[in-house]
Image (cartoon, grey):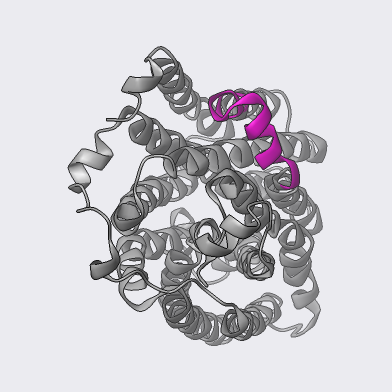
Amino acid sequence: MTASEADQNDPQKIPFSVYLLALCQALMMSSTSLMITASSLVCLTLTDDKSLVTLPLSLQFLGLMLTSMPASILMGRLGRKQGFLIGTLFGLVGALLMVYAVFNHQFWLFAVGSFLIGIFNGFGIYYRFAAVDMVSEQNRPKAISYVMAGGVIAAFVGPNLANFGQSMFPSEPFAGGFIYAVIIYLLIFVVISFIKFPKVISSQGKQAEPRPLRKVASQPMFIVAVICGMLGYAIMSYLMTATPLAMKHHAHDFSDTAFVIQWHVLAMFAPSFFTGNIIQRFGVLNVILTGAMLAVVCVVINLNGQTVWHFWAALVALGISWNFLFIGATALLTQTYREEEKSKAQGFNDFAVFTLVTIASLSAGVLQHKLGWQTVNYAALPFVAVIIMSVFWLKMKPLELRLY
């Protein structure tokens, strides 16, 4: 029995496999938050060119971007399980390379390892879409939210692993954190092996010919979903990547940085327990607008002080902003394509999202190094304005014209 058939019998049911996907999301984001906490700082010891310290993290986003479309197509042919298992192997090899690079002080090898982890992330970003495949249409926002809620664990695990790892090898204080990353990818591989995914739908079973991608992507609702997902994620990545560097510049301890990142990740994912219900009650466009306004709040706080508590409050607001924007955009996107169109529609969306995220994360380090923290924050505001304008543009369209 397929997921959709099961949902017809019990349309309110959330399958156990969705919760296992949430665990995979938790482990993936634990590794990501570990990398965000430690990557830029360890690179300060691996290269003399300080403008390059965010390059490995940017290469992680580049690997994700380049993989997003091929990963979606591969999973459309082989199935979700095989795709996720293949992707996890890239993450495992990447983490092992990063451990070796830290011990041997090889910046470029560290960057290669980060790129391979990005390839893994290019598969892992589809956990939320895999959950959508398992539930009825009315439960899609909830399924997305539950998977994203797995990141709550990451808020505590990732930064603390980076912190605990400092005492594992006193001569190389950051190496221990990346050893923990190796363990994380092994755990993901095991969990994926136990998940039951719906079978791949064969071409013979399709009810209609898929529309060309340009036709799907020209729908106003699709356009706004991509814009909000793309800019919302990029703004978050941009400000988050620059924050550890700004905190170091203002002489804050690494433990303070880990504390701020931990709360940021918690704020990113804790609302997910409620975001699906909030979307059902208030509407997805209103939730997206709220996320955009919280991004403005983040910038205002950052511009008004550089204490630990300013950084903390700003990144908490930024985390909630990302949650509303990304889950809202994903829920909006799922309304724009048919079953036989999902691989290319999801792949195009995530390619667009993480192309801009890659550019944003790389720009953060350069702007912070060259122009300073205030310029970094002012530069985010025009992109927030684009999100707000795109939502109002869609709101002004009659319902029957939002989808072609």
- Using the image, determine if residue 68 lies above or below residue 108: above
Which residue is at the far top?
A: 396
Which residue is located at x 68 percent, y 54 percent?
146
Residue placed most toward the observer, 63 or 195 = 195
Residue placed most toward the observer, 314 or 118 = 118
Magenta span dominant secondary structure:
helix
Which residue is located at x 71 percent, y 84 percent?
171
- Using the image, determine if residue 274 lies above or below residue 127: above
Classify residue 71 as left or right of residue 243: left
Can residue 347 be seen in this snapshot?
no
Classify residue 206 as left or right of residue 35: left
Which residue is located at x 76 percent, y 82 percent?
170
**Quadrant of the snapshot with the C terminus:** top left
Residue 174 percent location from the top left of the image = 67, 75
Classify residue 288 as left or right of residue 81: right
Can residue 199 be seen in this snapshot?
yes
Give the residues drawn in magenta, as a range. 273-290
Q: Count of labels shown?
A: 0
Residue 66 percent location from the top left of the image = 31, 62
Which residue is located at x 32 percent, y 21 percent?
401
Q: Quadrant of residue 69?
A: bottom left
Q: Would residue 30 be counted in the magenta stretch?
A: no
Residue 48 percent location from the top left of the image = 48, 64
Q: Quadrant of residue 246?
A: top right
- Using the image, determine if residue 244 lies above or below residue 26: above
